[in-house]
Amino acid sequence: MGGYVTKDVVATARSVLERHSTQEGALLPILRDLQDEFGYLPEPVLPLVADTLNISRAEVYGVATFYHDFHLEPRGEHTITLCRAEACQSVGGVALAERAKARLGLDWGETSADGRVTLEQTFCLGLCACGPAGMIDEKPVARLTPQKLDAIMAEVGE
Amino acid sequence: MRVFVPKDAAAIALGAEDVAAAVQETAEARGIAVDIVRNGSRGMFWLEPMIEAETPQGRIAYGPVEAHDVTSLFDAGFLDGGSHPLRIGKPEEHPFLKRQTRLVFERCGITDPLCLNDYRAYKGFEGLKRAIEMGPAATIDDVILSGLRGRGGAGFPTGIKWRTVAETVAPQKYIVCNADEGDSGTFADRMIMEGDPYCLIEGMAIAAVATGATQGYIYIRSEYPHAVSTMSEAIVCARREGLLGERLLGSGHSFDMEVRVGAGAYICGEETSLLESLEGKRGEVRAKPPLPAHKGLFAQPTVVNNVLSLASLHFILVEGGKAYRDYGMGRSRGTKPIQLAGNIKHGGLFETAFGITLGELVDDIGGGTASGRPVRAVQVGGPLGAYFPPALFDTHFDYEAFTERGGLIGHGGVVVFDDTVDLWEQARFAFEFCAFESCGKCTPCRIGAVRGVETLDKVRAGINPAANLALIDELCEAMKFGSLCALGGFVPYPVTSAIKYFPEDFARRLPAAAE
C-alpha cells in the first residue's frame, strides 16, 4: 500500500506529462497513465496537469470525476470487479454480486479496511455468452459460481 | 504441428492461458514439437476454450477444454484428430457455424490475428487497393450501393455519411471508429478487434481514402484491455509494412491511426460524447446540428463509424457493393453479426443475413435457455432495447421490423432470460443504469432516470400503483422526446415493453414484512 507515497510524485508526473507533449486531446491518456503510475490520481498532480495543458484546474477535476475509471483516493491492492449488466443478471449475477458485497462487507467502489481489496461494479465486459463474468485486477473470469467467487475472495483477501 | 488456442478475452476468462501452457508443457515433456497459434474465437462460447489441432484431414476442434484435460487429449492423440469425449470435429461443419453467412467474421478464429500473411491469404488489403484504384467518388457510390447502414444501432447509411464528409472542405478530416461497445449482450466488436484487427484497419483506411481523411482514432472502452493490446500491436505491424502512414500502398493517400482508451463511461458510445472524450473533455453529449460529418472532432469533418460497419468494408470493396446488397431483406441489406447471450444454451456470435426471426435465433440456433427452464423474455439491442416475450418471436431481424414492434436491433445483442426473471426488476435496472451513466447534460435523462427508480419502487411497495404506473408512462414520454441523445431517449424501450408485455410483474407487491 505504502509503495505509492515513496515515489517522487511530482517528478514522476512530469515524466508522464512529457510523454504526451505532442498528443492532441491528451487529457484522458495522461490521467490514465498517471493512475497506472500511482494507483490513483493524487491531488497534487491535478494542478500540474492543468498547467501543462493550459486548462483550468476545474476542467481537469471535472474530467477526472466524470469517468468511472478515475479515482482520487487510493485503491486496494487488488480489485474484484463484477459485471452487473443484463446478460450476467440472467444467469445469476445479482445473487453473486450480493454475495460478494456481504462477504467482503463492502459496497461498490469501497476498499477493505486493511487495504487488500476494492470491490467494483462494471456494466459489461463483453463476456455475455459465458456469464456471470468479472475481473480480478486485469484478469477476466467467466462462468462464475458462488464457489469460484468464494475462492477468488479468499485468495485476494489473504 | 500447429495447435490453435484462442486468445479471445472470453476464452482467456475461461482458462485459455492455462490450457496453452499445459499444451506447451505436455508437448515438451513428450518430445513433440508443437507450434501454438493464438487465434481469435470462432464464437461458440459454450465450447470455449475450444482448441484445434491441424491435421491432414483439416482442423479438428476439442472443447470446452480445461488445463487438466490436456494430458488425456495427448493420450487420445488429439494432434492427429484422435477421439476424445471433448472432440467436436471440424469446426466448419458444426451446425452453429454451418448455418452462418460469415462475411465480416470470415477469418475470425481461423487466422493468427496479428499475422499479416494470414490476412493477405484472405485477400487482405485488396479492398483498400480497389478503393484506391476506383477513387473516392466511385468508392462512396459502391458503399451506398451496398446498402450498408450503421451497425452501432442507429442504422444511418454509411455511404451517405461518407459523402457528406467527402464534400465538406476542411484542412483536416478524421475517421473515428466507435469501439465503445458498452451494450450488455454484445461482444462482436471485441471479437473482431481481438481476432481480426487488420480487417478493421483496412476498413478505416478505405473510409479515409474515400473521404480524404488523414488521421484516424479507434476509441476502445477500457473494459476491453485485450482488444486494446491486439489493436495497438496490429497498428504497429501495419505501419511497418506501409499499410498505414505516408503513401498508402504507393498511392497519394496518407492515413495513420491511434488507439484511444475510454475511461468507463457508457455514454461515450454516443458519437458526440465520444468526440468530446477524444478531445480530452467530459463525455457530455453535444446538441446536433452540427453533425459530426460537418463539425466533428476538433470541429473538423469526421466520419464516426462502428467497428462492424468498418469491418464490413473489406468484403464490400473486394466483392462489390452489389454482392453485399444481395444479402438481407427490405432496407436492411447485408449481414448482421448477432450476439446470442445471457441465459442461452448455445451462446455466441452468429452472423447471418438480415431477415432471420427472433424465434429461430433463440430456440433453434441458441437451443433455448442454459438453465433448461422456459424462455420468458428476450432483450434485444442492449440496455436500451425492448423486452420481448416469446409471443413476438416471429419478429424478423431487420431494422424496420423491430421498430414496427416497438423495439430496436441496436448492436445486435440478444439477451435471453428464463422464467425466473422479474421484469419489474429489469425495468427498475434500466432506470438505475441510466441514472448511473447519464452524462447529466439534459434534464429528462439526468432527473428522469432517478425519478423512474423512485416511482417503480412505489409501485412495488403498493403505493398508488395505478397512478404511479401512469406517471411512469408520462415520464417515459418526457424522456423519449425531451432527451438530447439515445440514452435518456431510449430508456423507455425496456421500461414500457416490460410493463406492456409483463404487467403481472408490476402488480406484485412486497410482502408486508419487508415494509
Image: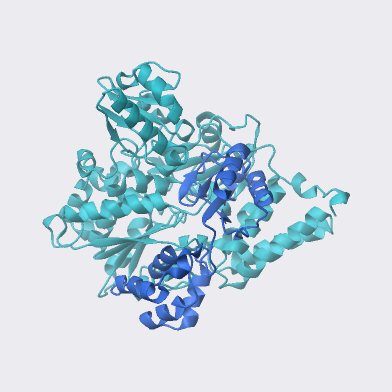
Chain colours: A blue, B cyan
- Where's the C terminus of chain B, which quadrant? bottom right
Residue B84 percent across, percent down from the top left? 42, 17
Residue B260 percent across, percent down from the top left? 36, 62
- Where's the N terminus of chain B, which quadrant? top left
In the image, farthest residue toward the right: B512
Q: Is residue B27 visible?
A: yes
Drawn side of residue B152 relative to residue B77, left or right: right
Residue A34 percent across, percent down from the top left? 41, 68
Residue appearing at x 45%, y 37% in the figure: B15
Drawn side of residue B225 relative to residue B285, left or right: left
Say which quarter of the image contains residue B305.
bottom left
| Viewer-proximal residue among B225 and B511 | B225
| Viewer-proximal residue among B215 and A156 | A156
Q: Is residue B126 above or below residue B81?
A: below
Q: Is residue B107 above or below residue B272?
A: above
| Viewer-proximal residue among B410 and B224 | B224
Drawn side of residue B134 relative to residue A31, left or right: left
Q: Is residue B49 above or below residue A13?
A: above
Q: How many numbered marks appear?
A: 0
| Viewer-proximal residue among A47 and B347 | A47
Residue appearing at x 30%, y 61% in the figure: B258
Say which quarter of the image contains residue A25.
bottom left
Q: Is residue B182 above or below residue B416?
A: below
In the image, farthest residue toward the left: B250
Say which quarter of the image contains residue B294.
bottom left
Residue B399 percent across, percent down from the top left? 48, 49
Q: Is residue B213 visible?
A: no
